[in-house]
Amino acid sequence: MEKIKIPNGLFAYRATAEDTFKIGGFGTCDDCGQFAAKGYLVPVLNHYQCPRCFHEFKSFAKNYPEDLSFQKRTMEYFESKIPLGVEISDWADREHLLELMDSADLYPYVFSGDTADGKTCLIYIHSQMIVQFINEEKPRARIYHRDGTIDDPQEVVT
């Protein structure tokens, strides 16, 4: 399970159907009722959503201050039952990047390299966040925040 912050400031988790078993779920989207092997846990709703329903939710969701205590309690419950981690793919390991953030003497700090599958990667380290750029057909960037949250990869406009 991986914690992310959506554009309106609410939190969600990338999760799998198997993750939902640990909290009494079956991998079924609480909105459309379809099975989703991969989806999102949305603490403010206490829902598991398939990618389609989650992206629809993100388009209209509002961040109401009165919902934050419920979101926090639900997040604490999810994290007590399902371990947080980052799916390792072409994106860097979050723990390694946070170590780099803590060890960098000067900010900003930038380095580049290649991912395991040969894509060019640039990482920008700032005192409060790390931005990783992956050069693909459509370049993307992901932001790692010091508090452990990770924003969804965003397409980079060049």
Image (cartoon, helix red, strand yellow):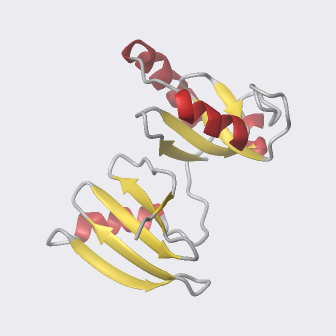
Q: Is residue 65 above or below residue 144?
A: above
Q: Foreground residue, 138 or 106?
A: 138
Q: Is residue 132 above or below residue 115?
A: above
Residue 82 lies, in percent from the top left, at: 63, 40
Q: Quadrant of residue 15?
A: top right
Q: Is residue 39 above or below residue 156?
A: above
In this view, the residue farthest toward the left is 106
Q: Foreground residue, 85 or 63?
A: 63
Q: Is residue 50 left or right of residue 158?
A: right
Residue 9 lies, in percent from the top left, at: 40, 34
Q: Quadrant of residue 132?
A: bottom left
Residue 56 lies, in percent from the top left, at: 63, 34
Q: Quadrant of the C terminus?
A: bottom left
Q: Is residue 126 above or below residue 146?
A: below
Q: Is residue 106 left or right of residue 96?
A: left
Q: Quadrant of residue 24?
A: top right
Residue 23 lies, in percent from the top left, at: 71, 30
In this view, the residue farthest toward the front is 158
The residue at 75%/25% (across/down) is 30
Q: Is residue 35 left or right of residue 48?
A: right
Q: Is residue 26 left or right of residue 53?
A: right
The residue at 27%/77% (across/down) is 110
